Amino acid sequence: MTDTVHAASASAPYPFPVIVEVRGVTAPARFSRLSEAMAALLMTLGALPLSSDQQGYFAELFGPAAVQTVGRRLATHGEVRALAFLDLTPTVVRLYVAGSGATR
C-alpha cells in the first residue's frame, strides 16, 4: 500500500478524493466525495447493456448503502475493482484513491 493511501486513511477515513473508470467506456474521472463517485459510476453502469443480474450486482456493490464498506476497502486496499461483461467482453470497473498510483 502506498504512503498516499496511508495518509488518506489516517486523515479522513472515507471522503478522500477518488477516481472512477469503466475501462474502454469512460476516461478516469476524479471526485472529491466517495458518495458522488459511486453515484456517477452507477449512472454510467446503468446506461450500459448489462444483464439484470449484473445491474443488481453493481447496485449492491456501489449503491448508497455501500459507501462505508467501499470507503473501508479504499482505506485498506486503495481500490475496488470489478468486471462488467458487455456481451462476452470483460470490462474493468475501478474505483480508487486519487494519487494512489498509475492506471493499472
Image (tube, rainbow, N blue to C red):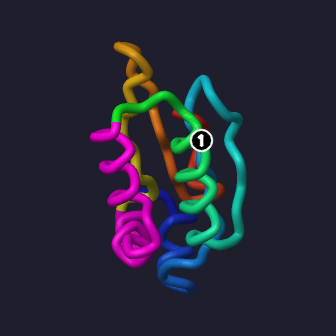
> Most extreme residue toward the front, as rendered?
52
| Extreme-bottom residue of the structure | 11
The residue segment tinted magenta is 52-76
Q: Measured along the vertical axis of the image, is residue 44 above or below residue 76? A: above
Image location of residue 55, percent across then percent down: 38, 44
Number of numbered discs: 1
Q: Residue 28 lies in magenta, yes or no? A: no
- Main SS, magenta region, reads helix
Residue located 58% across and 78% down the image? 15
- Residue drawn at x 50%, y 78% as measured from the top left: 14
77 left or right of 17 in image: left
Looking at the rendered structure, the kind of residue marked 1 is Glu
Q: Could you tell whether 9 is left or right of 37 in the image?
A: left
Q: Nearer the viewer, residue 25 or 16?
A: 25
Circle 1 Cα neighbour tier, 10 Å, few/some/many (<14 / 14–19 / ≥20)? many
- Please say if 96 is above or below 12: above
Q: Residue at x 52, y 42 (%)?
A: 45
Quadrant, the N terminus: bottom left
Secondary structure category for the residue under label 1: strand
* Quarter residue 44 falls in: top right
Q: Position of residue 61 (x, y in %)?
A: 35, 57
Asked where in the image residue 37 lies, by quadrant, the reply is bottom right
Q: Is residue 52 above or below residue 43?
A: above
Magenta residue check for 64: yes
Q: Residue at x 33, y 39 (%)?
A: 52
Pinpoint residue 21: horizontal percent, then vertical percent: 59, 41
**Closer to the camera in the image, 16 or 51:** 51
Q: Quadrant of residue 48?
A: top right
Task: Find disc 1 in the rendering and name its residue.
Answer: 21
